[in-house]
Each structure stands twice: as C-alpha cells, then as structure tokens.
C-alpha cells in the first residue's frame, strides 16, 4: 500500500482535472491496489458499505498529529477550540495530546467534562453567557472564563453573592481592530463587533476598571480572536503586537491570541503551518514589548481537525442539462455541511473507488435539501465514468461540518466514525427519524411562574 502522497507525487496530470491532491487527504490516506483509498488502514468503500452514507470519517492519526504539533509549537500553551468539532472522543484526543479545551456553550462545556478533561484545563467563551453556563463553570472550577461583556460580570457577582467562593480568574476579550481578510461572517476582531470590547476608544480600559473593582473576578490576562479561515500571517502578528502592548501596560502576564489559522480546501490553496503561525504570534508579541520570558497561547480549531475529516456520500442522481451543467446529487448536503451555503466555501470531490483517476467531468455536487443554494461543490471535477450508486467523497470536512449540521428537511444527521490501525470506531451514531419524532410532544406549558 503506497501512501496517497506517494501515489500522487510526480503525476503528470496536475491541476483541476487531475486526481485529487494528496495534500487534501488525511495523513494516513493510502492508495489501495484496487484503485481505492484507505484512511487509517480502513478501505473507505468497505466502511461506506458497513455504516451507510452519508457519514463523517475522521483519521485519528491526523487528529493526534495536529494536536501534538499545536501543543509543541505554542510554547505558551494551546487550547483546542472545540466548536470546530465537538464530541467526547475528540475532547479526549485533545486532552491526551496536551491541549486545553476551549468551549463556548453549556453543551460544549458538558462534553468537555464528560470527556474527563480537567476543569482547570477548560476555557469558557461566549458573547452572551447564560447564568447556567457561568454557574457550572464556577462550580466545576473552570480554568479561565473569558469575559466578553460587563453584563456577564454582573452575573458572576450575583452568582458569587449566592454561592460564595473566591474570585474566578478571567481574561478580558478585546477587539484589536485588525482586518483578517476573511469572510465577514467569521471576522471577529474589528472595532465594530459583537465580541469583546474595543481597545480603541477606551471601552477596554473601562472594562478593566470594572473588573478590578469586582470581588467576583480576578483579571489575569487578555484575549483576542480576529477571525477564522485566516490565511495571512500579518493580521495575526499585528493583533499580537496590539495585545502585547496592552498586556505590558496593564502588567498582565497571560495573553491568548485565539484561533483562526485557515485550512487548504482545494488543491491550489496555500496556508501557513501551525509553526509559522506560532512564530508570527511570537514576533508580534516581541514587537509589542512582551518580555521574552512570556509567551502567548492560542486556540486552534479548524487547523487541527479540518483535513482529518472526509464526508462520504452516495450519488443518487446525475442530471446532465443539455447545454448546461451536470448536477450530481448526493444523499446529504447543506444539512451536514452548511459552509458552502453560508460562506461560499469551496471544496473538491473525488471517487474513493478511483482515487488516482483523472477528473475531466465538470459538475455541481448538490445535496437533497429543498433549495437551490444546497450546493456542496459548485465546480467539482469528477471522473468521466461517475455513475448513480458511486460513493463520492468530499475531503477536508473535519471542521465546522458536523459541528454546524442541522436537521433541515427533518433529515437525520450522519454518524461520526474514527478510523485508525485498520479499525473503525463509531463515536457518534447516525440520527434516526425516531430521534426527531421523540422530541415531538403536545404537553401543557405551566404559565404564571415567578415573574
Ligand atoms: C474565541 C475563539 N477561539 C478560537 C476559535 C477557533 O477558530 P478556528 O477554528 O478558526 O481556529 C474561534 C472560532 O470562531 C473563536 O471564536
């Protein structure tokens, strides 16, 4: 068995109509003698037969390798941003590989705790944290709460007044007003943002005063996250510089510079490595005057999990419009991967039965949901002999796919399978329509409670 990287190297046919680029596949992807593809030693076609489609397949080798790499390159530590892909099995991998866990909701927090991540290694985010979230975080001794608004400080004070306890260590989330040159919906660190408080104009300074006066919190650091799917290093470096300068003037020693490093989704995409990103953050911190003894931490999500994941579908219809496009419809769509519909994200597709085959057929890979925007790969290139019944794979779907999946059209969400060493492990089972029906009820709502 040759690795897909070996099989793909030196191939004469390159570019859009050539075989899928090995760089888009998980680390353990290996071409099989049959022309097929194994990931984690598991033949993807055999897996599709065993578990059905659609399904999310994750290579645990890639997950572990990226998590260890992040733990190594970020001298100041790194937390896995679990919003990118949150489940107990993933949280366990992150913790076992030396990462802390960033959670941004009660559900993500509960999953981290269910995975036995030490509470002290958990960082709680959220621009509108509920009392329930803060209560659980405080009761379990979550390591850091990232204060995003002053209303949240009021809630922490009320909690402390009720439950007692020492002040909780917090970071203040600030917006450095840096443009990360990514999609507007995932740009988070400009002046005009629902997240954090701006450095410019004095809001951050006012928040600091409020925190310093509060008996419920202890300000120990600063946080910023400029956005996601960021592929340039300069915005990261500039954000680091601005935060470092503030941390120095406020005599704070902890500095977390968020996540955001982009992933390559198509063969011609180029992204910096985790190491390059870590160096840019360090450079920015030095430029901002942070002493060499202090190092920033980070919160990578996408860059750790995107390439580890592949989604498998079955082709159900192939519609060749006379003089128009070819539509290849699969048994999934925007319900399991809303990113193309939300952000215009671009992917590639290939057939796992013929991983090294040329892909001369231009086609739109579409889903089964009731809208024309339900497109998974608008400009796919596929093998010419593609047929109904083929298993079709979309690589680099490990981040914000399962995490953002919905039940639109009452379609149950696909299962998650981890593969390694020739074995497949079901870590999230397939939803069923019965699961959805179980939520249906017709009970009275007791009104007139405490008002
Ligand atoms: C506060 C925070 N940290 C980390 C991340 C992870 O970002 P990414 O998955 O792009 O690395 C996000 C994503 O939105 C975030 O909001």
Image: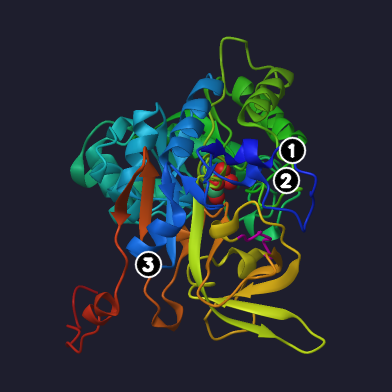
Q: Position of residue 227 (x, y in %)?
A: 64, 47
The main secondary structure of the magenta stretch is: loop
Distance from mark 3 CB to nearest ligand 1 atom below 8 Å:
no
Q: Nearer the viewer, mark 1 or mark 3?
A: 3
Q: Is residue 149 visible?
A: no
Q: Which residue is mark 3?
A: 52
Q: Position of residue 360 (x, y in %)?
A: 76, 65
230 with respect to 411 (left or right): right
Magenta residue span: 344-350
> Which numbered disc flags the more N-terminal residue, 1 or 3?
3
Q: Which residue is mark 2?
A: 180
Q: Which residue is mark 1?
A: 235
Quadrant where the C terminus lies? bottom left
82 with respect to 96 (left or right): right
Position above or below: 123 against 438? above
Q: Quadrant of residue 338?
A: bottom right
Q: How is the image coloured?
A: rainbow
Do the residues bearing badges 2 and 1 touch, measured as CB atoms within 8 Å? yes
């Amino acid at each position: 068995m040759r690795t897909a990287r070996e099989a793909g190297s030196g191939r004469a046919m390159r570019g859009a109509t050539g075989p899928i680029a090995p760089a888009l596949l998980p680390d353990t992807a290996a071409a099989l003698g049959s022309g097929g593809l194994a990931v984690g030693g598991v033949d993807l076609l055999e897996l599709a037969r065993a578990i059905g489609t659609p399904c999310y397949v994750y290579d645990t080798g890639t997950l572990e390798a990226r998590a260890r790499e992040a733990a190594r390159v970020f001298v100041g530590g790194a937390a896995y941003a679990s919003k990118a892909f949150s489940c107990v099995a993933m949280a366990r991998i992150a913790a076992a590989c030396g990462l802390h866990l960033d959670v941004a909701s009660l559900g993500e927090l509960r999953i981290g705790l269910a995975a036995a991540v030490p509470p002290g290694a958990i960082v709680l985010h959220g621009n509108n944290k509920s009392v329930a979230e803060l209560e659980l975080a405080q009761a379990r001794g979550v390591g850091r709460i990232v204060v995003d608004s002053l209303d949240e400080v009021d809630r922490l004070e009320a909690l402390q007044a009720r439950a007692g306890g020492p002040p909780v260590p917090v970071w203040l989330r600030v917006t450095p007003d840096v443009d990360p040159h990514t999609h507007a919906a995932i740009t988070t660190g400009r002046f005009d943002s629902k997240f954090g408080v701006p450095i410019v104009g004095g809001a951050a300074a006012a928040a600091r005063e409020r925190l310093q006066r509060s008996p419920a919190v202890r300000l120990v650091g600063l946080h910023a996250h400029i956005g996601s799917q960021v592929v340039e290093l300069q915005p990261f470096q500039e954000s680091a510089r601005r935060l470092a300068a503030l941390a120095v003037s406020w005599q704070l020693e902890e500095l977390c510079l968020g996540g955001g490093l982009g992933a390559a989704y198509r063969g011609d995409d180029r992204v910096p490595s985790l190491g390059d990103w870590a160096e840019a953050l360090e450079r920015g911190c030095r430029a901002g005057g942070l002493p060499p003894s202090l190092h920033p931490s980070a919160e990578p999500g996408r860059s750790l999990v995107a390439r580890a994941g592949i989604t498998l579908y079955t082709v159900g219809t192939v519609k060749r419009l006379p003089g128009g496009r070819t539509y290849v419809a699969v048994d999934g769509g925007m319900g399991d991967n809303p990113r193309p519909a939300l952000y215009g994200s671009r992917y590639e597709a290939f057939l796992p039965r013929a991983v090294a085959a040329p892909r001369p057929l231009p086609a739109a890979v579409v889903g089964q949901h009731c809208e024309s925007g339900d497109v998974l790969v608008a400009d796919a290139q596929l093998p010419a002999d593609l047929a109904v019944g083929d298993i079709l794979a979309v690589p680099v779907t490990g981040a914000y796919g399962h995490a953002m999946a919905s039940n639109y059209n009452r379609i149950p969400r696909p299962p998650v399978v981890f593969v390694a060493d020739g074995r497949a492990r079901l870590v999230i089972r397939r939803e069923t329509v019965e699961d959805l029906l179980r939520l249906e009820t017709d009970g009275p709502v007791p009104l007139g409670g405490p008002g």
